[in-house]
Amino acid sequence: MRMEVHLHADIPMLEGVSKKQIELAVAPLLDYLDAEGLGDVKSLEPEEPGLRYDEKELMLLMCWTGETGRSFHPALESALEHLGPLCYEAVEVELTLYLDNGEQESRLLFVGPTAHAIHEAQRRCMVEDVAALLARQFGKAQVAEVTALVDRLFEHEWKERASAEQKPERAFETATRPSRKHLH
């Protein structure tokens, strides 16, 4: 089953990371897309750059739309897992799935150098999303009260995770997010 997807992220890389290192890290995705390098990844949308490394800004830019099949998600997850240690900080990677019925589903994947950095990026995104949603109806004081609770929930979750049985650290995480449309 083929599905159209959109991948969007600006991933800051560590100083000294080369384009070749990034291409080696994202090799599972490049292999899936039958691309030799980042420059070979072309989007279905002509105005989108695809995958590009800005060496001056130390930023891996992802803005790509394409048709994918079942093995796309494992290839993407593997690429993000290998990319994590090269990241300067944890950020979200937005994946939009365009469903056959005309609807779309958005997922957030997080990539970063450590599990803690990813957890903090997830917390930051959640606080931003909750604050934006509540700001439509409530004042700053009420929004601050709820976002403080969200911060405490994330802190409690991290402490529980730290005291739980250790699992291998992953350089990415997945979450579902309400749909947001990109304007390109």
Image: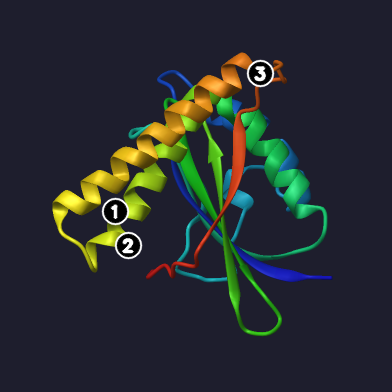
10 Å crowding of disc 1: few (<14), some (14-19), many (20+)? some
Label 3: which residue? 164
Q: Decide which of 108, 83 is in the foreground and name it.
A: 108
Q: Is residue 57 left or right of residue 13?
A: left
**Residue 153, how many percent across, how many down?**
44, 35
Please, which residue is most extreme toward the left here? Answer: 140
* Label 2: which secondary element: helix
Quarter that holds the C terminus: bottom left
* Kind of residue at disc 3: Ala
Q: Decide which of tag 3 and tag 1 comes sooner along the chain.
A: 1
* Kind of residue at disc 1: Ala
Q: Is residue 150 above or below residue 112?
A: below
**Residue 183, how many percent across, how many down?**
37, 70
Label 2: which residue? 133
Q: Decide which of tag 2 and tag 3 comes sooner along the chain.
A: 2
Asked if residue 24 shows in the view, the reply is yes
Marks counted in the figure total 3
Q: Is residue 170 left or right of residue 19?
A: right
Marks 1,2: beta carbons within 8 A? yes
Q: Decide which of 160, 77 is in the foreground and name it.
A: 160
Q: Is residue 100 left or right of residue 176?
A: right
Disc nearest the viewer among 2 and 3: 3
* Label 3: which secondary element: loop
Instruction: Report the residue at 82% width, 59% height from top.
Output: 70
Residue 21 is marked as: none
Q: Decide which of 62, 142 is in the foreground and name it.
A: 142
Query: Residues under labels 1 and 2: Cα distance?
Result: 5 Å
10 Å crowding of disc 2: few (<14), some (14-19), many (20+)? few
Query: Residues under labels 3 and 1: Cα distance?
Result: 30 Å
Label 1: which residue? 131
